Image (tube, rainbow, N blue to C red):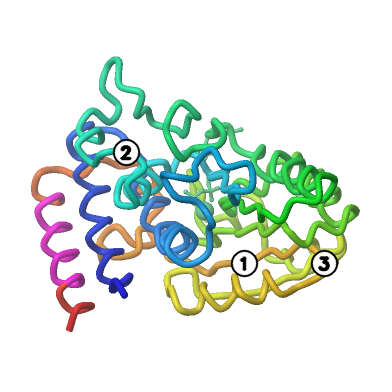
């Protein structure tokens, strides 16, 4: 079995390589969401490059689409496309643009305009119920994204239709683009809000693959309700000076910062392998 913790630091290096080369990207949210993506793609999603078109594949939508570099790193590692494709990330004429688009193998939906993933997932999950299909549907939203009203229309419908084949994950890093969520738009009563719409609410350490794995298992076993996993994460997780810092939402590392980050990530990768 692959050491997924070590893998997470390897992929963080791939992400920072992409961003450093292209001089664009969203490093903070990439590093906070990556362990969620690894847990999903390595332990839960019934999706592979061979079954990317299978009608009964699980559906995953990265609603916080600005974290696309994290998704690209996982999809490349899983063989949805060659890793060398990512050398063109954000370059003129490359299809590997700065937000998810469905021209890329393994990506279901264009996203990046926040607030849409959950409602689309509600439709996909409802379609599965109507068709008697067994696939499951997953989306990851940012905690800043929850300020979008459309999220709550999706939550209302998900609860109404008792979509137990739907799991939403909130990347609860407590930061959004311009500051903390509590300054910009409070999210501290998420449990009550989701519960009031008929959802099962679980909390998990969102940078711990074992804890996330357990939360996804509970979600799968929960009947008659959709589940939301509030994943407590650290924005920028993995590199000390990037962690918990609002400007690193989309800051580009200098050459010195890049070297320092790579050194830290390599040390953490080696430590995870011991
Ligand atoms: C509809 C919409 N409004 C504004 C933006 C600009 N924007 C991009 S990322 C972001 C902050 C998102 O914060 P959060 O959801 O917490 O993401 P994370 O902290 O995980 O990076 C904003 C406001 C957008 N992409 N879409
Ligand atoms: Mg956030």
Going from N to C along the chain, the mark reached first, 3 or 2, is 2
Q: List the residue tagged with mark 3.
A: 195
Q: Residue 124: image x %, image y %?
A: 72, 43
Magenta stretch secondary structure, dominant: helix
User: Could you tell whether 13 is left or right of 170 in the image?
Assistant: left
> From which residue to which does the magenta span run?
258-269
> Which image quadrant: the C terminus?
bottom left
Instruction: Look at mark 2 in the image and give the residue it sits on.
Output: 81
* 247 up-or-down from 271: above or below: above
* Quarter of the view holding residue 268: bottom left
Name the image quarter holding the N terminus.
bottom left
Residue marked by disc 1: 230
Q: Residue at x 55, y 62 (%)?
A: 172
| Closest to the observer, 138 or 202 | 138
Q: Residues within 10 Å of mark 2 (few under 14, many from 20)?
A: some
User: Which badge, 1 or 2, comes first in the chain's sequence?
Assistant: 2
């Amino acid at each position: 079995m692959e050491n997924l913790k070590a893998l997470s630091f390897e992929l963080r290096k791939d992400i920072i390589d992409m961003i450093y080369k292209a001089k664009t990207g969203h490093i903070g949210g990439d590093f906070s969401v990556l362990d969620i993506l690894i847990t999903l793609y390595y332990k839960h999603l019934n999706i592979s490059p061979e079954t990317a078109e299978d009608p009964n594949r699980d559906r995953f939508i990265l609603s916080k689409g600005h974290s696309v570099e994290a998704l690209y790193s996982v999809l490349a590692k899983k063989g949805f496309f060659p890793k060398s494709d990512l050398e063109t990330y954000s370059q003129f004429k490359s299809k590997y643009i700065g937000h998810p688009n469905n021209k890329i193998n393994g990506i279901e939906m264009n996203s990046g305009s926040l607030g849409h993933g959950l409602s689309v997932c509600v439709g996909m999950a409802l379609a599965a119920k109507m068709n008697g299909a067994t696939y499951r549907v997953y989306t990851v939203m940012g905690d800043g994204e929850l300020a979008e009203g459309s999220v709550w229309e999706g939550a209302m419908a998900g609860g109404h239709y008792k979509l137990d084949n739907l799991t939403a994950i909130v990347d609860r890093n407590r930061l959004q683009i311009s500051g903390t969520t509590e300054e910009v738009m409070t999210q501290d009563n998420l449990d009550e809000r989701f519960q009031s719409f008929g959802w099962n609410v679980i909390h998990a350490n969102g940078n711990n693959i074992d804890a996330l794995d357990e939360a996804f298992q509970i979600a799968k076993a929960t009947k008659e309700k959709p589940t939301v996993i509030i994943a407590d994460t650290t924005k920028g997780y993995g590199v000390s000076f990037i962690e918990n810092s609002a400007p690193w939402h989309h800051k580009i590392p200098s050459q010195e910062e890049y070297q320092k980050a790579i050194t830290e990530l390599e040390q953490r990768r080696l430590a995870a392998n011991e």
